[in-house]
Image (cartoon, rainbow, N blue to C red):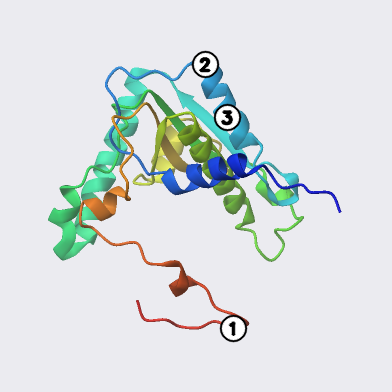
Amino acid sequence: MPDYAFTAAERQAVYRAISERRDMRRFAPGGVVPDEVLTRLLQAAHAAPSVGLMQPWRFIRITDRELRRSIHALVDEERALTAQALGPRGDEFLALKVEGILDCAELLVVALCDNRDEHIFGRRTLPQMDFASVCCAIQNLWLAARSEGLGMGWVSLFDPARLASLLQIPDDAEPVAILCLGPVPEFPERPQLELDGWTVARPLPEFVSENQWVERVP
């Protein structure tokens, strides 16, 4: 049988990108992502697996400064509403830095494509597989960015309908992510939400079972 495995060094690089990926909120002032690097990152995203090869992702690069500020305003409004919904933890949440929209070198909005109902292959019983496919593309971009020494943060604090209107996204398409991308001062050794005391990541054994669902107490 042919050996399709990567070399040890290549495997180590892949696993390193996975383990050192972080959801970044802090970006280096004046950072730049060269065009050729951005092209590589988007190509990595575009190489993601997708249900029925429908490639449901759409990437909108935000280059207009005023539009970037408008997106930030939408996120800031949702940030306040999220704090209200969190009740006793609202003030703690407001103390967190949750986005870098005005600071990052590149801002991307990722959307689910329009005309999705035309795609039945793999979606008849699991229509959400189009969203799963977009998430795979985002993860590809995230890991590629880490390998390029760039940080990325996924912002989900926004009203999809208002962001869609702002970006003239078709009615049957849907924005799913605001991505902040660029050089960062550092990559923390642990997830930022752990360092900020918001929560603690749980170990793998709590999430793995065999043959049937097993409820485990954290």
User: Residue at the spot x=79%, y=49% of the render?
Assistant: 3
Q: Is residue 55 left or right of residue 79?
A: right
Quadrant in the picture for residue 73: top left
Q: Position of residue 79 (x, y in %)?
A: 25, 47
At mark 1, the secondary structure is loop
In the rendered structure, find residue 42 and report the number of the disc placed on it. Answer: 3
Q: Amino acid at mark 2?
A: Asp
Residue topped by disc 1: 212
Whether residue 206 appears in this view of the structure is yes
Residue topped by disc 2: 35
The CA span between labels 1 and 2 is 48 Å
Q: Amino acid at mark 3?
A: Leu
Q: Position of residue 138 (x, y in %)?
A: 53, 42
User: Residue at the spot x=84%, y=49% of the render?
Assistant: 2
Quarter of the image that includes the N terminus? bottom right
Q: Position of residue 114 (x, y in %)?
A: 62, 41
The residue carrying pointer 3 sits among few (fewer than 14), some (14 to 19) or many (20 or more) residues within 10 Å by Cα, namely: some
Q: Is residue 95 left or right of residue 23?
A: left
